[in-house]
Amino acid sequence: MTLQEEFKLPSRIESVDEAALKADDFAKKSGLGDDFISSIDLAVRESVANAVKHGNKFDESKIVEVRLAKSSVGFEMSVRDYGSGFDPEEIPDPTNPENLLKASGRGMLFMRAFMDEVEWENAEGGGTIVRMVKKQ
Amino acid sequence: MSDINISERQAGDVTILDLAGKVTIGEGSVALRSAIRRLLGEGKNKILLNLGSVGYIDSSGIGELVSSFTAVNKEGGSLRLLNLTQKIQDLLAITKLLTVFDVYDEEAEALASFS
C-alpha cells in the first residue's frame, strides 16, 4: 500500500519549518524509524529552502509543491519550484579546497548524503523538480 | 518563541557563546551573525562557540559557522568550536570542514588553546 500526501507552500522562509513538520508527521504515520526520519527532515528542509531561496527567489506569488510518498521501496519525496531552473552539474563542489570557506552551496551535498537517490529535472511548464528516495 | 538562544560568558580574553536551539536558515543564522559582528565591534576576537545544546543545524547554519570563522580571522582573531553533537560532527565531516575548524570536547582544553 502506498501512502501519499501533497501540499503547497508559499515562497517564504517559514515554509521550510512547515514542510519539515508535515514530513515528520507523515513519516511517523508511515511507521518510519528515528534515524530515517532525521534524514528525511534534513532533506526536506534543504530542498524546500533551495526552492524558496534559489528557485522562486522568495517571490510569494510562486508556490513550492511538495509530494511525499511511502511505498514498499521506502520514502519518496519531490519538491517543485517555479523558478528559472538550473544545471546541477554547474554547482561547484563545496568540498573542493577552494570552496571550503564559501558561505553557501552545501544543501545539495546534504541531500545527496542523507538520501539514497536524488535527481533534479526541469519541470514541464517551468521550474525545477527534485526527486529523492530513501530506501528501506 | 525564538529558534535560538545565545548567551555570552567571558573567560579571560576569550568570549564563550553558548548556543541553544536551532541554527537554521532565517532567524538562527541571522542571530549568530549578529552576535559575532557585535563581539568583533567590541574588539572581542577570541571566540569559542559552544554548540552542545544546538539540536539542529542545516546547510545555512553550517555556512554561518564558516562566515563567522572567516570574519573573525579577518580581524586577526580566532573562532573555535566546543561540544559538537554527533549530528553536527557528521555534517562537518561530510562538508570536510572538520579540517578547517579547531574542535574541542572540553572547555578547559579549548580555553587553554587560545593562550
Image (cartoon, rainbow, N blue to C red):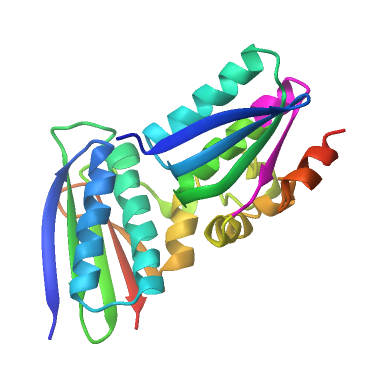
Left or right of residue A1: residue B7: right
Residue furthest to the top: B42
- Which residue sits at x=53%, y=36%? B64
In this rendering, the count of numbered labels is 0
Task: Judge by depth and name the residue closer to the eye, B109 or A12.
Answer: B109
- Which residue sits at x=21%, y=38%? A11
Left or right of residue B107: residue A71: left
- The N terminus of chain B appears in which quarter of the rendering? top left
Q: Quadrant of residue A103?
A: top right
Q: Which residues are magenta?
A: B70-84
In the image, is residue B36 above or below residue A105? above
In the image, is residue A102 above or below residue A106? above
Q: Residue A123: x, y in percent?
A: 21, 55
Q: Is residue A104 visible?
A: no
In the image, is residue B68 above or below residue A81? above
Q: Residue A58: x, y in percent?
A: 26, 32
Q: Residue A80: x, y in percent?
A: 22, 53
Q: Residue A24: x, y in percent?
A: 25, 62
